[in-house]
Image (tube, rainbow, N blue to C red):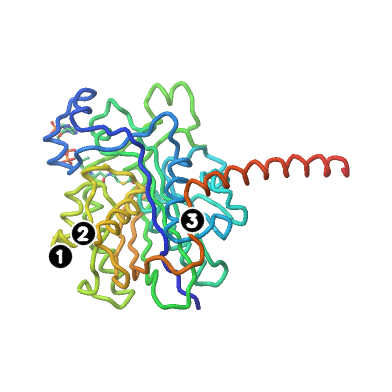
């Protein structure tokens, strides 16, 4: 049975930065309160030209570059996002088109902020089964488009960005070792974007009542999060036959530094074992774990052969943890050039449109 190795990683955040002082000009809040209660100092906010697919494509190209893999070699693209560009088509298909990944299946996976853990597990299981050889997993968000900028309880928390992993099959032991995925839909009302779906389609009333913004019961979500971060980490370690001492770092979902502190206390581990960058990005939902991973790898906190735990929670309610032996890029024969590959992606996309148009004419004549 092949092993599923994480061989590429990349991130992309929009340039504009919104500081706590900037927020204090919009809503009744202040830097001291936000930092003390959440650990957040600033977050990146999408420009009008940034979308989950464009940020996700940038992160994906960087991950492919690290893995030395062509987009055309990909078998599968899973995009996990809480802020899809449309109800359909899947944001994964928009990214597939921008990459020109002509042989890849593509779909979206929704498990809110836990989505990246779920998606990496799905990709890893597909590789482990022998069905595919390579997969791209992307977590990408423009949460700023769904935040009520008049609600100080939520607008201070979120940021925009994307992160991506490439997974590849290898006979060498390692890669994704074990995963725990959990859910509890009885808490679905605690964190929700109520309208815009088929239960409450957009109407004048839903807009007037602010039903298209994120609604959150912060205290309840906080209580739930502190409970499951430690328990699912313990559970996944047990499943993998490992102990806390085998783990070099824990990369948690970046929602609130107090939640991460509570997880460290629950696990009786020093906070230094956790990767924390919520101060500079806020909560980027599905993108927070891969963004934190890229920074940790670049700072030398994650090295080949070390074991890493990813742990998260989110709306649904969902939560989960995944333990992996970090691989680093597999040796492959070709260096990828991000700029050149982006251009080739565009060219392949245009050629596919022409091909589809011509096929339409041919099949139209036959019909
Ligand atoms: N600035 C100043 N004061 C504020 C602000 C603000 N931005 N926001 C709330 N307050 C006030 C409240 O009105 C309240 O005042 P009151 O006592 O007069 O009523 C007071 O501060 C305390 O409010 P709490 O809600 O009790 O504050 P708490 O310490 O719980 O912190 C927070 C709130 C940061 C939202 C916290 O509950 C939290 O982090 N919850 C988890 C949120 C989370 O992780 N969400 C993401 C989940 S992942 C996903 O799927 C998207």
Secondary structure under the numbered disc 2 in the rendered image: loop
Q: Earlier in the sequence, mark 3 or mark 1?
A: 1
2 vs 1, front mark: 2
Q: Using the image as rendered, state which of residue 68 and residue 124 is in the foreground.
A: 68
Which residue is under mark 3?
336
Pointer 1 local density, CA inside 10 Å: few below 14, some 14–19, many at least 20: some
Which residue is under mark 2?
274
User: Viewed as shown, does residue 162 lie left or right of 171?
Assistant: left
- Image x and y of residue 359, in percent: 78, 44
Pointer 3 local density, CA inside 10 Å: few below 14, some 14–19, many at least 20: some
Pointer 2 local density, CA inside 10 Å: few below 14, some 14–19, many at least 20: many
3 vs 2, front mark: 3
Q: In the image, is residue 120 above or below residue 285?
A: below
- Image x and y of residue 100, in percent: 58, 49
Give me the disc on residue 256.
Answer: none
Callout 3 touching callout 1 (CB < 8 Å): no
Callout 2 touching callout 1 (CB < 8 Å): yes
Where's the C terminus, which quadrant?
top right
Q: CA distance from mark 3 to mark 2?
A: 32 Å
Q: Quadrant of ligand 1?
A: top left
Secondary structure under the numbered disc 1 in the rendered image: loop
Q: Using the image as rendered, state which of residue 242 and residue 344 is in the foreground.
A: 344
Looking at the image, which residue is at 36% across and 65% down?
180
User: Viewed as shown, does residue 15 lie left or right of 98?
Assistant: left
Q: CA distance from mark 3 to mark 1?
A: 39 Å
Which residue is under mark 1?
269
- Image x and y of residue 248, in percent: 23, 68
Asked whether mark 1 and ligand 1 are closer than 8 Å, the reply comes as no
Q: Earlier in the sequence, mark 3 or mark 2?
A: 2
Q: Earlier in the sequence, mark 2 or mark 1?
A: 1
Q: Using the image as rendered, state which of residue 149 and residue 330 is in the foreground.
A: 330
User: Viewed as shown, does residue 270 lie left or right of 110?
Assistant: left
């Amino acid at each position: 049975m092949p092993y599923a190795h994480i061989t590429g990683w990349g991130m992309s955040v929009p340039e504009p930065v919104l500081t706590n002082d900037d927020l204090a000009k919009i809503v009744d809040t202040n830097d001291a309160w936000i930092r003390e209660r959440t650990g957040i100092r600033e977050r990146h906010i999408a420009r009008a030209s940034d979308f989950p697919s464009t940020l996700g494509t940038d992160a994906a190209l960087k991950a492919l570059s690290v893995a030395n893999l062509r987009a055309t070699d990909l078998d599968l693209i899973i995009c996990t996002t809480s802020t899809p560009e449309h109800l359909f088509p899947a944001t994964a298909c928009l990214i597939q088109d921008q990459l020109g990944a002509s042989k890849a299946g593509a779909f979206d996976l929704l498990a809110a902020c836990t989505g990246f853990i779920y998606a990496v597990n799905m990709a890893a299981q597909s590789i482990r089964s022998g069905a595919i050889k390579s997969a791209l997993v992307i977590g990408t968000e423009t949460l700023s488009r769904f935040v009520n900028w008049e609600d100080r309880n939520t607008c201070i928390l979120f940021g925009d960005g994307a992160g991506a992993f490439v997974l590849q099959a290898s006979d060498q032991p390692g890669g994704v070792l074990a995963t725990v995925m959990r859910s509890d839909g009885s808490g679905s009302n605690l964190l929700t974007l109520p309208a815009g779906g088929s239960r409450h389609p957009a109407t004048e009333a839903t807009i007037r009542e602010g039903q298209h913004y994120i609604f959150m019961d912060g205290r309840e979500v906080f209580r739930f999060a502190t409970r499951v971060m430690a328990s699912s980490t313990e559970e996944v370690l047990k499943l993998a036959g490992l102990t806390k001492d085998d783990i070099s770092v824990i990369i948690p979902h970046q929602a609130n530094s107090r939640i991460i502190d509570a997880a460290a206390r629950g696990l009786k581990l020093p906070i230094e074992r956790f990767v924390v960058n919520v101060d500079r990005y806020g909560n980027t939902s599905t993108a927070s774990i891969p963004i934190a991973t890229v920074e940790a790898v670049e700072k030398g906190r994650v090295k080949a052969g070390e074991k890493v735990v990813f742990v998260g929670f989110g709306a649904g309610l969902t939560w989960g943890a995944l333990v992996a032996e970090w691989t680093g890029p597999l040796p492959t024969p070709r260096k990828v050039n991000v700029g050149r590959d982006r251009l080739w992606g565009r060219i392949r996309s245009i050629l596919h449109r022409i091909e589809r148009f011509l096929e339409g004419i041919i099949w139209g004549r036959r019909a």
